[in-house]
Amino acid sequence: MLDIFILMFFAIIGLVILSYIIYLL
C-alpha cells in the first residue's frame, strides 16, 4: 500500500515537472 502511495507521489511530481518544461518551451 505504501509503495502505491510513493508511485503516485512521484507520478504527480513528474507531471508537474513535465508541465513546467512545456511552459518554458
Image (cartoon, grey):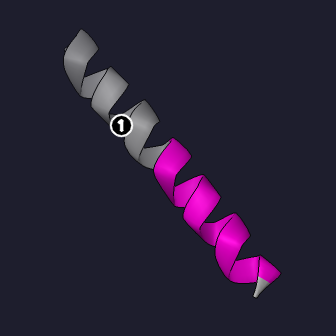
Residue at the right extreme? Answer: 2
Say left or right for 9 vs 18: right
- The quarter holding residue 20 reads top left
Label 1 neighbourhood size at 10 Å, few (<14), some (14-19), many (20+)? few
Vertical position of residue 7 compared to residue 2: above or below:
above
User: Where 23 sits versus 16, above or below?
Assistant: above
Q: Is residue 20 above or below residue 9?
A: above
Question: Which of 2 and 13 lies nearest the eye of the viewer?
Answer: 2
Report the span colored magenta: 2-13
Q: Amino acid at mark 1?
A: Leu
User: Measuring 63% from the left and 69% from the top, which residue is drawn there?
Assistant: 7
Residue 16 % position (x, y): 42, 36
Q: Position of residue 6 (x, y in %)?
A: 72, 66
Identify the image quadrant of the N terminus: bottom right
Badge 1 element: helix
In the visual, does 15 lie left or right of 24? right
**Residue plotted at (61% across, 55% down):** 10
Q: Position of residue 3 (x, y in %)?
A: 76, 80
Q: Which residue bears the numbered disc 1?
A: 18
Residue 22: horizontal and vertical position, in percent?
23, 26
Image-quadrant location for residue 24: top left
| Vertical position of residue 25 compared to residue 10: above or below | above
In the image, taking residue 14 as reference, residue 18 lies left or right, namely left
> Residue shown at 57%/66% (left/top)?
8
